[in-house]
């Protein structure tokens, strides 16, 4: 088999790079000592990886593809006439192994990337992608109203707060508040502007900006906001990198990750965020000044708007509410422009506003703008590759735990591709850079000697001193 697979074949190189022998010890607990022999764990993970490398959407297609390709057979260590595992064995084994085995494989490959010098660790770009679940909208069923009406009301309120603004499910007859999928209850109805409403999961991805290696992936329910996932993502990426002695210093994300809790989490972890503030942030309240000492706003007419309490809006953000008294506004000449038909003026201000003010200042700098461009060019192409070439357009399993395993394997496949590609171009770049430096040095030395030569001819003493 080896003689028939070319030297530069991807799967031959992968077989030489990927050492999965640790899997025998890790997966030992999942096997009994009696009954039919099960699939070899190394063969299982290699077959699953092939599914992502070749963008094959089902276990049946993986087995069919391996049957036809000699390099794939060589990669999994099978002979040409050796019977392959049955496709349903892959599905059963995927469910059998716990999430920790898939996570360990992801970390093992990440460790190899770090050892090769591909990961700097200090700067991480985080973004998300909605991935279609393995369930159809036809499977939606109405939620039964719980016996405890009060608890039902609380559940509805919580779901309402988690619902993203761009969730346009109200136009349809179902929503996450009232419906669930009977085939995959973990999936959620979700949509994005310009995209169809469907049952989806939310994949969160963290990418190192040095060589675009994926440093953490997580699956969340699709009705969660990005800002609600940031804390868990930061904890995950910090744990993965700290294990290899790297420290996260900066996080780059889009405005979807902007919230009081998210910014507070970055501050608590000594991480500098580069996250544009969300649209509701206002740099100033026109016509009103903030009196820090008395914690109130004062309008142009000298009327105080006093603090009345915390208000949590539909976006889940807690805000401090300030109100004027109806008596003060009753005879104001600006009443129509200021409060219209309302009887009093109301201002709602973000809690911990200083976090947003600091972020605003940071994002206005040249460095802040450069970081935003860097975020875009780092994480967005990675998400595109995962969706278009590594099978993450759709999850082919059911349940959030299985979906998480799928995203972990897609990220592992992505990092392995990076790892194999990394060697040759990097050496070339270093050689080219050294050649260039050598040429510049030669040219400068030549010029220097020319100058010294001409000085020598005109003034010998000066040359000696020089
Ligand atoms: S309406 Fe009330 S809050 Fe607005 S400017 Fe007049 S007094 Fe001030």
Image (cartoon, grey):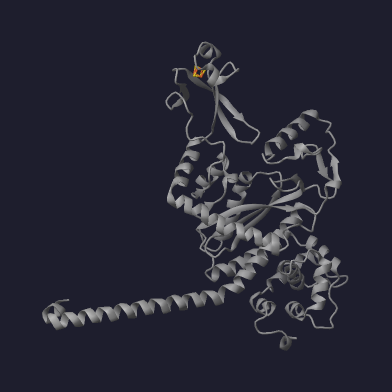
Q: Is residue 452 visible?
A: yes
| Left or right for 98, reference 301 | right
Could you say which is closer to the camera, residue 330 or residue 33?
Answer: 330
When asked about the image quadrant of residue 105, the answer is bottom right
Q: Quadrant of the C terminus?
A: bottom left
Residue 165 on image: x %, y %: 66, 39
Q: How many marks?
A: 0
Question: In the rendered image, is residue 99 in sight?
Answer: no
Q: Closest to the observer: 189 or 458?
A: 458
Could you say which quadrant of the image residue 290 lies in? top left
Q: Residue at x 63, y 64 (%)?
A: 107
Quarter of the image where the N terminus is located: bottom right
Which residue is pictured at 56% across the width and 17% down the height?
344
Provide residue 427's location: percent of width, then percent of height. 51, 77
Task: Report x, y in % for residue 431.
Answer: 46, 78
Residue at the bottom extreme? 3
Residue pictured at 54% horizontal, 70% vertical: 115
> As displayed, is residue 120 above or below residue 160?
below
**Residue 309, position as x, y percentages in the image:** 57, 25
């Amino acid at each position: 088999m080896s003689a028939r697979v070319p030297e530069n074949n991807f799967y031959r190189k992968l077989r030489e790079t990927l050492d999965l022998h640790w899997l025998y010890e890790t997966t030992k607990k999942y096997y009994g000592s009696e009954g039919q022999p099960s699939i070899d764990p190394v063969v299982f993970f290699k077959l699953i990886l092939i599914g992502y490398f070749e963008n094959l959407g089902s276990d049946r297609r993986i087995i069919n593809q391996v049957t036809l390709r000699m390099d794939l057979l060589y990669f999994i260590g099978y002979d040409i006439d050796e019977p392959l595992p049955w496709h349903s064995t892959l599905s059963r084994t995927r469910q059998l192994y716990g999430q920790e085995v898939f996570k360990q494989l992801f970390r093992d490959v990440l460790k190899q990337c770090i050892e090769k010098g591909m990961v700097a660790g200090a700067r991480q770009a985080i973004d998300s992608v909605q991935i279609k679940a393995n369930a159809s909208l036809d499977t939606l069923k109405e939620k039964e109203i719980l016996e405890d009406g009060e608890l039902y009301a609380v559940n509805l309120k919580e779901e309402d707060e988690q619902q993203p603004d761009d969730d346009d499910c109200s136009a349809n007859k179902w929503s996450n508040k009232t419906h669930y999928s009977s085939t995959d209850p973990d999936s959620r109805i979700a949509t994005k502007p310009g995209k169809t409403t469907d049952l989806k999961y939310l994949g969160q991805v963290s990418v190192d900006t040095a060589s675009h290696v994926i440093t953490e992936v997580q699956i969340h329910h699709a009705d969660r906001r990005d800002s609600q996932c940031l804390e868990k993502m930061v904890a995950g990426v910090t744990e993965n990198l700290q294990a290899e002695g790297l420290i996260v210093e900066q996080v780059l994300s889009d405005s979807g990750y902007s919230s009081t809790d998210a910014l507070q989490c970055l501050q608590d972890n000594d991480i500098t965020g580069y996250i544009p503030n969300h649209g509701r942030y206002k740099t100033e309240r026109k016509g009103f000044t903030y009196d820090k000492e008395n914690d109130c706003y004062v309008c142009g007419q000298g009327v105080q708007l006093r603090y009345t309490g915390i208000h949590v809006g539909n976006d889940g953000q807690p805000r401090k509410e300030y109100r004027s008294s109806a008596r003060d506004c009753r005879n104001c000449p600006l009443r129509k422009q200021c409060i219209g038909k309302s009887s009093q003026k109301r201002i709602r201000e973000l809690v911990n506003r200083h976090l947003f003010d600091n972020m605003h200042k940071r994002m206005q700098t040249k460095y802040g703008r450069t970081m935003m461009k860097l975020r875009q060019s780092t994480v967005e192409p990675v998400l595109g590759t995962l969706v278009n070439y590594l099978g993450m357009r759709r999850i082919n399993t059911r349940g959030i735990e299985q979906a998480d395993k799928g995203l972990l394997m897609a990220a592992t496949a992505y990092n392995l591709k990076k790892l194999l590609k990394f060697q040759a171009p990097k050496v070339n770049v270093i050689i080219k850079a050294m050649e260039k430096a050598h040429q510049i040095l030669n040219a400068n030395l030549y010029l220097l000697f020319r100058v010294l030569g001409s000085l020598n001819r005109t003034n010998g003493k000066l040359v000696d001193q020089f």
